[in-house]
Image (spheres, grey):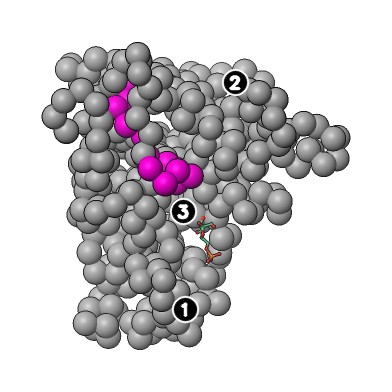
């Protein structure tokens, strides 16, 4: 039996009908993000062939030499979106400063934050990598966008999502009305609905962290990880360790099967007193998705969605996943670290 094929564009339009005041601008912005994701997916899947077939790989419009894949992905998202007429400003992991809409182009009502290709150091090992994005509503006065539009707490996000380039390319998004997943069918170039209203298991059996940092962790984090290695009364066996080292891939697995991902503060990086991961375009969007799917996301004590960002590339400790697991971690931090 052929199931009803629902593209991400169709799904966005159906969602739009739930909001009478919707103008279609938001759906159009999300569709533009999906198109950029398809272009990046094509290049990510071709990357391994650059050496073998002597392909020119990803060339920019001037046909210049091969760029780094994350720079290429950044170019694709910025070029596709900055002139779309839907955004007022764009902040990306690859650029020190936010990108403003060029002169002569319509300035829209959304601020976009993007990590164009997180985990790109894994691409040579053929490990799944991903794009993460967050969409805030413009709040600054005047026409042009400003940092005020993206330095907003995560609970004010209008939408969040990611695209994972793995054994298949998937797009996952939420507008606060459920978490929905789409798989790219390259033969027709469409993201097709595969999981609607995804819910994260309340408790998982998987923990995901870089245990090479163990000696640098706080007392509470160490005791929590040690606890997971004891017999879990709920399953009569210890938790299972799974760490891909690619945030989107580790998060996506936990979203579907339950579990907890941890990148806590570690003392080995005195230059990074707030941990490694970025608040605006990594932690915030994934936190919106986690919470919308029934999970949780904290920096150890504070909910990620409540943190008011102070600057574009601000780092934050990230503990995210099944609600029971994240809250148990928080209880260890309260008990041993405060
Ligand atoms: P580590 C990839 O470089 C990344 O930014 C995330 O995708 C991933 O979760 C993390 O860093 C891995 O960091 O220090 O364990 O290699």
Say which residue appears at 43% left-offset and 63% top-offset.
276
Q: Position of residue 163 (x, y in %)?
A: 50, 38
**Label 1, label 2: how far apart the Cα atoms are:** 44 Å
Q: In the image, which is nearer the foreground, mark 1 or mark 3?
A: 1
- Residue 312 locus on image (x, y percent): 33, 49
Q: Is residue 303 visible?
A: yes
Q: Which residue position holds label 3?
A: 251
Q: Which image quadrant for residue 151?
A: top left
Query: Number of labelled discs?
Result: 3
Q: Nearer the viewer, mark 1 or mark 2?
A: 1
Pointer 1 or 2: first along the chain: 2
Q: Which contiguous range is marked in magenta?
A: 86-97
Side of 292 relative to 182 (left or right): left
SS label for mark 3: helix
The label number, if any, that marks residue 268 in the structure image: 1
Q: Nearer the viewer, residue 107 or 26?
A: 107
Q: Residues within 10 Å of mark 2 (few under 14, many from 20)?
A: few
Q: Nearer the viewer, residue 226 or 306?
A: 306
Q: Is residue 65 left or right of residue 235?
A: right
Secondary structure of the residue carrying tag 2 is loop
Residue 296, percent from left and from top: 30, 57
Q: Quadrant of the C terminus?
A: bottom left
Q: Could you say where residue 299 lies in the image, as x and y percent from the top left?
A: 30, 64
CB contact under 8 Å: marks 1 and 2: no
Res 179 seen here: no
Q: Which residue is mark 2?
A: 189
Q: Quadrant of residue 82?
A: top left
């Amino acid at each position: 039996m052929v199931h009803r094929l629902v593209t991400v564009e169709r799904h966005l339009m159906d969602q739009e009908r739930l909001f009478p005041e919707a103008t279609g601008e938001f759906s159009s912005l999300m569709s533009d993000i999906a198109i950029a994701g398809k272009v990046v997916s094509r290049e990510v899947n071709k990357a391994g062939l650059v050496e073998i077939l002597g392909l020119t790989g990803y060339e920019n419009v001037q046909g210049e030499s091969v760029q780094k894949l994350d720079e290429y992905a950044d170019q694709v998202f910025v070029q596709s979106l900055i002139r779309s007429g839907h955004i007022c400003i764009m902040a990306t992991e690859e650029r020190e400063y936010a990108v403003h809409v060029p002169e002569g182009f319509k300035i829209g009502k959304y601020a976009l934050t993007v990590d164009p290709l997180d985990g790109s150091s894994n691409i040579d090992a053929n490990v799944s990598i991903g794009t993460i994005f967050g969409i805030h509503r413009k709040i600054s006065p005047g026409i042009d966008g400003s940092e005020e539009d993206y330095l907003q707490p995560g609970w004010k996000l209008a939408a969040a999502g990611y695209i994972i380039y793995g054994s298949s390319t998937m797009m996952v998004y939420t507008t606060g009305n459920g978490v929905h997943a789409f798989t790219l069918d390259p033969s027709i170039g469409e993201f097709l609905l595969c999981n609607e209203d995804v819910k994260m298991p309340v408790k998982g059996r998987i923990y995901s962290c870089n245990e090479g940092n163990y000696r640098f962790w706080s007392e509470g984090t160490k005791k929590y990880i040690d606890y997971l290695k004891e017999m879990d009364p709920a399953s009569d066996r210890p938790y299972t360790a799974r760490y891909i080292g690619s945030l989107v891939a580790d998060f996506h697995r936990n979203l579907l099967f339950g579990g907890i991902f941890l990148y806590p503060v570690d003392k080995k990086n005195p230059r990074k007193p707030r941990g490694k991961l970025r608040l605006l375009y990594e932690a915030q969007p994934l936190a919106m998705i986690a919470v919308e799917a029934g999970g949780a996301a904290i920096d150890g004590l504070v909910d990620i969605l409540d943190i008011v960002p102070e600057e574009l590339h601000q780092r934050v400790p990230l503990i995210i996943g099944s609600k029971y697991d994240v809250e148990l971690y928080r209880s260890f931090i309260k008990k041993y670290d405060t």
